[in-house]
Image: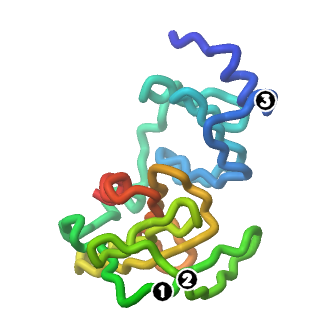
Amino acid sequence: MVKIPDDLISVARGRLSADLVLADARVINVFTGEIEHGDVAIYKGLIAGRGRLVAAEGKALFNPSQSVDKGLTNTVHIRPFTVEALRLKAGGETAPVIEIVPGQIITRKRIEKVRVIDGIVVPDIGRDILKLVVVERHRANGNIGVGLVMGFGLKWGALASSIAHDSHNIVAVGAQLGSRTAWLN
């Protein structure tokens, strides 16, 4: 039995700050296929969902259903690639950057001066310009799009998802080159 730390309960109740909070998240229950709503807080490696502990030390704290919809499994098909495929070659001192508009579904196109090392555009954390990568994951055709985005506020690490409003490919945003590659692979 896992002892639930008092500070984790305080995080779940919103009385103590979490390391990461996904507010009003829509979480797919991979065992039932149902979409569940609620805040998800991550604190000291533990996940609290809607005020209840759902995982600790890498293990689920609930009994998953044995019936899994096969349509929800084996849906990611990626042609193997190297970090070279994620490089964005500089075409000059400036490049197009997608700007996130907080609270909106729209974005803006900006032309920004970019940070370049050895002819490759790299993230500029100080200016909140991060690498954006989209990897096709349906037919393993090897298509990879690379660009820049601003407005995420990541200072380290990477964020990746295969849930997107248009094509549900894998979309990753990263502050460090290596962290994004790990998420994608």
Q: Quadrant of residue 112?
A: bottom right
Label 2 packing within 10 angstroms: few (<14), some (14-19), many (20+): some
When the figure is inspected, residue 103 is found, relative to residue 9, above or below; the finding is below
Residue 53 appears in the rendering = yes
Left or right, residue 115 beside residue 18: left
The x and y percentages for residue 32 are: 52, 47
Q: Which mark is residue 13?
A: 3
In what quadrant of the picture does the C terminus appear? Answer: bottom left
**Where does residue 179 sit, x and y in percent of width and height?**
36, 52
Question: What residue is shown with label 1?
Answer: 94
Residue 8 vs residue 38, the one in the foreground? 8
Q: Which residue is mark 2?
A: 112
Image vertical order of residue 91 relative to residue 126, above or below: below
Residue 132 drawn above or below residue 65: below
Q: Which SS class for mark 2?
A: strand
Residue 52 % position (x, y): 67, 29
Foreground residue, 14 or 28?
A: 14
In the image, what residue type sits under mark 3? Arg
Residue 138's spot in the image, x, y percent? 32, 74
- The Cα atoms of the two marked residues, 1 and 2, are separated by 5 Å
Instruction: Identify the amino acid type marked 2.
Output: Glu
At numbered mark 1, what does the secondary structure look like: helix, strand or loop? strand
Left or right of residue 69: residue 127:
right
Q: Is residue 62 visible?
A: no
